Amino acid sequence: MSVPHILIVDDDTILSGLLQLTLELEGYDASTAPDGDAGLAMLRQGTFDLVVLDLVMPKMDGIKFLRVLNEGGERRPPVIVISSTAGNTLSDEFRALGVVAIARKPVEPGWLVAQVAAALASGDGQTG
């Protein structure tokens, strides 16, 4: 079985690095992208099993990222949103866009690891 590949899309490079390290210590393969444009480009080039997404970023914010991701029509990975502007309640709008969990920054590493494991176990990737 291959190691799940996770894409972290966040303009906060320190936080991205910490999330990447946390996930790699749990045995996942993790990559980072500094904004939505770069994240979408990486998704087009490689296979990712899950996306960890910030909402507030330059160039392309997380909401636009989710909308563009959902326009693709192909299988899309489940998304975990982490943001300083989000609440902890998953809205129907976010669910429709493929979001499986949401948390306010700063996110607890144990919470993130548990959510990643649950999303990967449930096979929440959806078709558009």
Image (cartoon, rainbow, N blue to C red):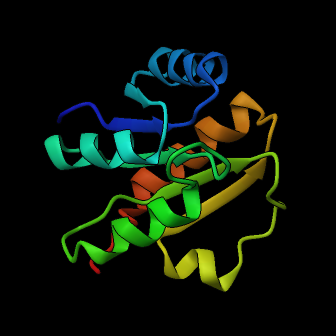
The quarter of the picture where residue 88 lies is bottom right
The residue that appears at 21% across and 77% down in the rendered structure is: 73
* Residue at the spot 73% in from the left edge and 48% down from the top edge: 83
The reply, left or right, for residue 46 in relation to residue 49 is left
Q: Identify the residue shown where x is 71% and y is 78%.
A: 91
Task: Classify the position of the N terminus by image quarter.
Answer: top left
- Which is more toward the observer, 39 or 78? 39
Hey, which residue is sitting farthest front in the picture?
Answer: 59
50 horizontally vs 14: left or right: left
In the rendered picture of this protein, how many numbered marks are placed on residues? 0
Q: Answer with the quarter of the image where residue 85 lies.
A: bottom right
The percent position of residue 76, horizontal first and vertical second, equals: 30, 64
58 above or below 106?
A: below
Q: Is residue 61 above or below residue 57?
A: below
Q: Position of residue 33 (x, y in %)?
A: 42, 32
Q: Is residue 79 left or right of residue 114?
A: left
Point out residue 26 in the picture as x, y percentages from the top left corner. 49, 22
Residue 86 against residue 51 in the figure, above or below? below
Query: Which quadrant: the C terminus?
Result: bottom left
Residue ID at (39%, 26%):
30
